[in-house]
Amino acid sequence: MIAPLTLEQLQQRFGGELANGSVEFDRVCTDTRKLDADAIFVALVGESFDAHDFAADLEGKVLGLVVQRRIEGCTLPQWIVGDTTVALGQIGLLCREQFSGPVIAITGSCGKTTVKEMLAAIFGQRHTPCVTQGNLNNQFGVPMTLFGLGPEHDVLILEMGANGPDDIGYLCGIGRPRVTAVNNVKPAHVEGFGSVAGIAAAKGQIYTSLEPGSTAVINADDEFADYWLRNMPDDVETLRVGLGLDCAICAENIEVGGDGCPSFDLVIEGVAHPVQLRLMGEHNVHNALVAAGCAFASGIPAAEIASGLALAGSVAGRLQLLRGRAGETVIDDSYNANPGSVAAAIDLLAQRPGRKILVLGDMAELGADAEAMHRQMGELAAERGLDGLYTFGPLGAAAVEAFAAAAGGSAHGFSERSSLVAALENDLTEDTTVLVKGSRSARMEEVVRALTDTGNGKGDN
């Protein structure tokens, strides 16, 4: 935190009750496995857990408590509130109010973590940014990022995720960004939004929550760009980025090298700046344009944006190039999946030399169209000339059937990862590239680990 807070400050600002007095703190913890004697503990409540059950045992281990019911017999200072998750956000808001530098927020169906890391690379050249760590982008993660703000930070870069229609608006109320962008809208978490249009409306709250004088960076190539522009609040500046030359920031002369990494001319206000990305996939040009728009709206010079983009490296589980135990090339894209990101991965894999095999775990939360979307991925994989398809999970059967019907290569579906790996290992040669992808629930990082002995289990599209 930039400056300490007290439980009394929180109670006076947001209500609730105090028990056993107040306490000053500059750290917050929510996990009883990671206690801090200099922090307050927020007792969160979830569907399958209630941290209040452990709160009575925390004396001497934390400074104070934020709870929904008074912990009897405990002498620690307690702020008693109606909802500890809301209280966590309120503490984050007070931390945000201590900060006066640029605040950028990114959301989208896929690629938002990559855009965040591109921004971190751009700003990191001359600034000290506070950046969302990992995938801490929800109602718990965004406050934790705000708690990490310190006097040394001069820019705040927030990633915001959503599983329901009001999530982004809530997070914007805590983070209060001044520059925002929706990277894209794809069929992801459809069950929580009802439709792709519902996703666009929910993500668009990152624009409708902006205060006058803020800047909205619009991906002009997204089908919902006009929708967001029509619903933009008054007195909010807009900056259009995309492949079209009518955009304030665009890309020209895109080329993809033999390593799968694109180069292009980043054109800002009519001046071209060459960029060579270290990230695989032509789709990362779009990610770079959104990052460039956010940086430019925050006052970063064009040449510095271009040099920062060239420094951005890959994120764990997102198109990482690895060597398999049989000498094959393994592309680890296992962190998450939706139809948009799978299509981009198929396009990337299709450009590789030699044999090309897609390993796809089921894509989750797609609602009633889930089977049809898996079928589309199988058809696309065959259309793009992939040599093999291996799937994991019940929905993969539709992809396998579609791949085979489209006269693709060999296709196999599995209900156990170990069986998938065993069959796949018999199909590998040194000239084979295997791309592994799937939703978090499919845990496809375990397949990467089995193939390489170096895969990781960490890491939203």
Image (spheres, helix red, strand yellow):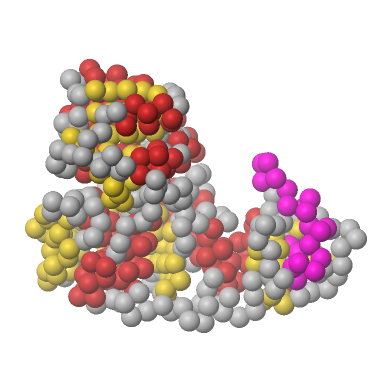
Residue 94 image offset from top left, x and y in percent:
60, 72
Q: Does residue 351 appear left or right of residue 79 in this picture? A: left
Quadrant housing residue 208: bottom left
Q: Residue at x 69, y 49 (%)?
A: 45
For residue 282, above or below residue 276: above
Most frequent secondary structure within the magenta stretch: loop
For residue 118, above or below residue 69: below
Quadrant housing residue 4: bottom right
* Number of numbered markers: 0
Q: Residue at x 43, y 31 (%)?
A: 417
Q: Residue at x 18, y 39 (%)?
A: 431
Is residue 119 within the magenta segment?
no
Magenta residues span 46-66
Q: Residue at x 13, y 53 (%)?
A: 257
Q: Which quarter of the rendering shows the N terminus?
A: bottom right
Residue 240 image offset from top left, x and y in percent:
24, 60
Residue 124 image offset from top left, x and y in percent:
35, 74
Residue 459 image offset from top left, x and y in percent:
44, 51
Q: Does residue 80 appear left or right of residue 312 in this picture? A: right
Identity of the residue furthest to the front in this view: 326
